[in-house]
């Protein structure tokens, strides 16, 4: 995990949430892992537009924050799976609320785009 030279001071609890969930793809990853463990290739197919490198980076950050766990199986070929931790499960209501809000706001956004 990256160690900052100057420690970050969290003046607001929203800063903590953004630190953990911030990033274009993290909410998607959390949402897709709600139904059980997934392999990296499965996640890459589910999160359209994400590169392998960015997926690996986002997964590493979520792992560093104890939101997900990585399990490597000693098989040939090597198999890796990611799943939400109990701590990560607590973020699901936040992600699902974001999804619900997006569904409600989508018609408004589409009207603005047309105009």
Image (cartoon, rainbow, N blue to C red):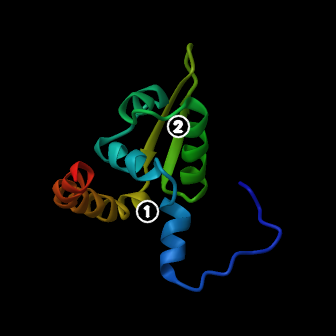
- Residue drawn at x 33%, y 65% is 94
Q: Nearer the viewer, residue 109 or 89?
A: 109
- Residue drawn at x 67%, y 81% is 9
Q: Quadrant of residue 54?
A: top right
Query: In this rendering, would 12 be left or right of 8?
Result: left
Count of picture labels = 2
Query: In this rendering, would 70 be left or right of 8?
Result: left
In the image, residue 45 lies at what x, y percent?
39, 27
* Residues at marks 1 and 2, CA–CA distance in whole angstroms: 17 Å
The secondary element bearing badge 2 is classed as: strand
Q: Quadrant of residue 77?
A: top right
Vertical side of 79 occupied by 57: above or below: below
In the image, residue 50 lies at what x, y percent?
49, 35
Q: Nearer the viewer, residue 29 or 39?
A: 29
Mark 1 crowdedness (10 Å alpha carbons): few <14, some 14-19, many ≥20: few
Mark earlier in primary sequence (1, 2): 2
Q: Quadrant of residue 48?
A: top left
Q: Nearer the viewer, residue 36 or 99?
A: 99
In the image, residue 19 lies at what x, y percent?
56, 66
Query: In this rendering, would 101 be left or right of 33?
Result: left
Vertical side of 78 occupied by 6: above or below: below
State which quarter of the image contains the N terminus: bottom right
Residue at far front of view: 115
The secondary element bearing badge 1 is classed as: helix
Mark 1 and mark 2 in contact? Answer it, CB < 8 Å. no
Task: Report the residue marked by disc 1.
Answer: 87
Vertical side of 72 occupied by 114: above or below: below
Task: Report the residue marked by disc 2.
Answer: 71
Mark 2 crowdedness (10 Å alpha carbons): few <14, some 14-19, many ≥20: few
Query: In this rendering, would 4 be left or right of 102?
Result: right
Residue at far right of view: 5
């Amino acid at each position: 995990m990256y160690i900052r030279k100057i420690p970050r001071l969290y003046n607001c609890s929203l800063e903590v949430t953004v630190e953990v969930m911030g990033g274009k793809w993290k909410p998607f990853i959390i949402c897709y892992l709600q139904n059980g463990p997934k392999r990296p290739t499965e996640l890459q197919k589910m999160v359209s537009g994400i590169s392998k490198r960015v997926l690996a980076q986002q997964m590493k950050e979520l792992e560093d924050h104890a939101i997900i766990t990585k399990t490597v199986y000693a098989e040939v070929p090597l198999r890796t799976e990611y799943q939400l931790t109990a701590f990560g499960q607590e973020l699901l209501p936040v992600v699902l609320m974001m999804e619900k809000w997006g569904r409600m706001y989508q018609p408004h956004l589409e009207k603005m785009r047309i105009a």
